[in-house]
Amino acid sequence: MSTTTRTPQKLRTRKPITVGAVAKNLSALVIAVVFVFPVYWMFSSSLKPQHEIMTKDPIFVFTPTLDNYTTATGVDLFWTYVQNSLTVTIGAVLLALLVALAASFAIARMKFKGRKGIVLIVMMAQMAPWEVMVIAMYMISRENDMLNSIPMLTLIYFVMVLPFTIWTLRGFIAAVPVELEEAAQIDGCTRGQAFRKVIFPLLAPGLMSTSLFGFITAWNEFAMILMLNKDKESQTLTLWLTQFQTAFGSDWGATMAASTLFALPVLIVFLFLQRKAVGGMTAGAVKG
Amino acid sequence: MTVDSQGTATAGPQDAPGRAAGKSQTPPPPSGTKEVLQPSRGRRSLPSGLLPYLLVAPALLSMAVLLLYPLIRNVILSFQQLNRKEFITRETVWTGFDNYTKLLGDSHFWSVTIRSIVFTALNVALIMLIGTCIGLLLNRLGKKMRLVLSLSLMFAWAMPIVASVTVFRWLFDEQFGVANWVMRTLGFSGYDQHNWFETGFSTLVIILILLVWGSVPFVALNMYAGLTTVGTELYEAAKMDGASGWRTFWAVVFPNLKSFFMITTFLEIIWIFKAFAQVYAMNQGGPDRGSETLPVFAYIEGVGQFHYGVAAAISILTIVMLIAVMSFYFRLILKQEEEL
Amino acid sequence: MKRKLIAAIGVAGMMVSIAACGSDGDKKDSDAGKPSAGGSKNLTVWVMDGSAPDAWMTEVNKAFEAKHPGVKVKVEKQIWNGIQEKVTTALSEDTPPDVLELGNTQTAGYAVTGGLADLTGDKAKLGYDGWNKGMVASSELDGKLYSAPWYAANRVVIYDKAAYKKAGVTPPKTRAEWIDGLKKLKAADPKSQAIYLPGQSWYILAGLIWDEGSDLAVKDGDKWKGNLSSPEAVNAMNFYKELAAFSNAPKDKDEGTPQQSTDIIPKGGVASWIGLGWEAGGAIDAMKKAGKTADFGYFPIPGKTADKPGSVFLGGSNLAIAERSQNKELAKEWLALAAGKEYMTKYAVATEGGLLPNTDAAQFKPAAGSFAESMAASSVSGKVTPVTPGWANVETAPNPIKDYMTKVLKGADAKSAAEAADKVINERINQQ
């Protein structure tokens, strides 16, 4: 974020080191440590040899080993899980973006009867308690022979992230000055062209932040997949994460290695998109 | 859509209009917007009456099939006795309002409800408070420190829920937990084997810490991003006027970010109220069912105890409650819609 | 939930990958079980993680596939955690697994739902007459047979020989001797735990209740009711508390959190603990990995008097066939083969006697001083949880017995806490 161009540098007092400045930086440091500690603990545990993980007094200095990662990735069907997770997540996000773009454009830029109702529906949809709807969803899938189906799961995740995506994108589209679009139309663009050439490029941050949100949601989803996809070949990485707590004891090292690997894509997406996305998320949020 | 025009600066190009205006007191820019919009639509050759519906249709259709339909099924289930036997034999046994009357007469249901509401309120208040403070802090930090802090926040944000619950359980483990070690190191006695999950209350406190930890980054980073849109001139002006930090916040920051606060609070209420994995995985609603919140209660009744019909009824009641609580927001947001 | 009863002695057998058995069928798994064009079929078998040594399973399936050309057996390992949910949903589907392993305390609960195939007519084929009568009980409901017993196991006390020697304690025969020994152990080494006993090991409490001549729940007319508040059961709980006083184990967890065998015992500082064969094996293994040597001795849980060992929960698994299975006849053939005498004998060998096979004829003669020897010695006092379909409901989380134990260990009055728990049990046990 600090790389954002709109950093308000002026807000910082240019005075030499004062008590206030020290306190400010110190508290920032403490907060940073507090927030990063669980993440650090996960990562460091994943590198510890088995017998140094479960200790009464935590061990901070140790010889790192990749054994846990070998265990974690050596699981049967690991690559199937990776593939399923990526398919489901990316599929859901792309689908949501596409459908939401159309819908949010209409909501933000057009006036039509029932528009308000649609806004209300989108807001309500955001509150859907998916976890407690698993049984109904399960029965529907069972009746339609959609159990253990990757497309079905993709569709569910798509609808799961759709309301937020519409809501956020709507804000972004509305934020693009109509004059720009208008100008393009005066220049002979059709409305569709105006959208593609003018609005779409300006939507980049919005698209990024919504895909980030969608990515996190779909990537993390747990309840549905457990209930709907029991076939190992149709499961995702969330199953893999819990796999190391078996009858033979919990392999915490492997669990932590798996968690680290699991968090990694989200983190990469985050760091990759952070410049735009974080600001973008606000825009979305601010916009209601 | 006044809210939109107001937040423009964050997302849109720098020349976006109306950035500093508070949302409710600025009908002019949006209405102006609308006027500009009208003629452009008038020029369209397509039957514009149909187009918006076509654009909205895929979204509505998919929500109808995969959200509304399951929801309706859920309502139907809530009027059935659907235990393990009916579930396997696929029998349908109608029991009318039995599930509801049973629930509403169950003191456990009410204590879970109250617990959920208090828990959510406390959580959201803390998240908003801490998030705002950190957001303000971010805004006032130097470049390097800001990078450190925001990176740290992002790490916490990106952490998968399943992984974070596992790590937290472990941090607060009775035997091997870092939390106990920290307390011992700081010289507190009685933390040799302190059980952080001793009671439902203490369990909820740990879950609260986890939820705050996981949610604050969203608020803080967005708050910061929002702050960058508040014209620095306004700040300077306030400062020049000799306003205290507190007053600056209420006079400058808050009005400008009012809709940010509103929407973020709205989202956080929903997210925390619905939080399932964090609460369930931490201690399965225990000890002695003392940390159950509504979604966990529904899950334990349904998937755990095989009373799917009762679980459906709980989920319906949960939705009704959420809608009741949120109707305030709906009205606010719909009002803004009208202003468009 | 009997997920702790995971017989997994055959760690050695785990080396052979089970994936070899069914990899050919992987691609078409959604059609599993349906006969496809080429006339080949898949038979899906769900077994629990650790139940079947891989080498044994491979052998069974090879023999089966040889007898039934064109049939592939696909074995899927399940974990105990959350298995009830999974089996329940699977039984409701159109293409369920054909054969499933079910915990013996849970079988009746599934039988009553109609999800399991009735095997009454196949008794002869399955070798009903040779089965251990104690184990058959959990397979039957209202005179009908719903599963074949597979194996059983029970817990014994596992002790560190060095610690016992140092304190001058020998394996006790009675409860009084047991407590006496624990006191000596504590005196000899105040820092270590004379016994590691988590607060929610309710199968152990069940044994103590049976020792008092009582039960977890009793039949009252045609209804069942919880019996924890009976004076006998309260006495049992008090004895449990006496034992637990020698332990620092968490009061609100069972032996699986943290896993006593791999996370606690290998760290040392525990003179004795109560566990299953696979747990002993797991601890030995974990200690080996950490460069230590385990020197364990075993003795049956002492009874009130020396003439009979303490009662133990006879946990185990049955193999059942799903009512909706598309290959019932084949599944029965597989069941007859796997649970038949020939392969059960091999099974007992593969598990080194750590698990009792379903027929006495297949029993493996355990080595002297082994876990299996003590287990066999105490299995004469083996008992099972109340045989009623409703029992499965009692075991589902949150288990009222576990919560009750925690409360008492934390100082609540046993009698009144038991009454509260009985109330929950009454509610659940009479439901189906």
Image: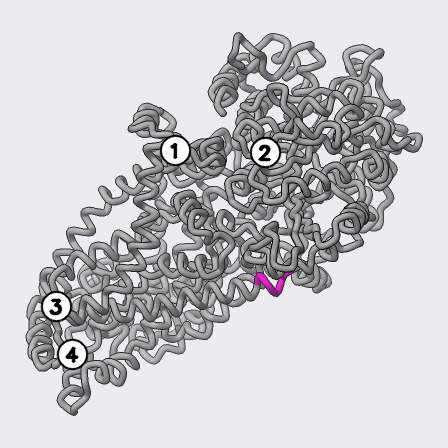
The x and y percentages for residue C237 are 63, 17
Q: Chain of mark 1?
A: B
* Real-space Cα separation, disc 1 to disc 2, in angstroms: 19 Å
When asked about the image quadrant of residue A81, the answer is bottom right
Report the residue at 33% width, 74% height from top: A205
**How is the rendered protein coloured?**
one colour
Report the residue at 39% width, 63% height from top: A213
Residue A29 visible to the viewer: no
> Do marks 3 and 4 both belong to one polypeptide chain?
yes
Identify the disc placed on residue C116: 2
The residue indicated by pointer 3 is A111
Residue A275 visible to the viewer: yes
Q: Nearer the viewer, mark 3 or mark 2?
A: 2
Q: What type is the residue that disc 2 sits on?
A: Leu
Secondary structure under the numbered disc 3 in the rendered image: loop
Q: Chain of mark 2?
A: C
* Real-space Cα separation, disc 1 to disc 4, in angstroms: 55 Å
When asked about the image quadrant of residue A114, the answer is bottom left
* Real-space Cα separation, disc 3 to disc 4, in angstroms: 14 Å
The x and y percentages for residue C353 are 85, 34
Q: What type is the residue that disc 1 sits on?
A: Thr
Identify the magenta region.
Answer: A77-81
Looking at the image, residue C204 lies above or below residue A176: above
The crowding category of the residue bearing disc 3, from other C-alpha atoms within 10 Å (few below 14, some 14 to 19, many at least 20), is some
Report the residue at 77% width, 18% height from top: C381
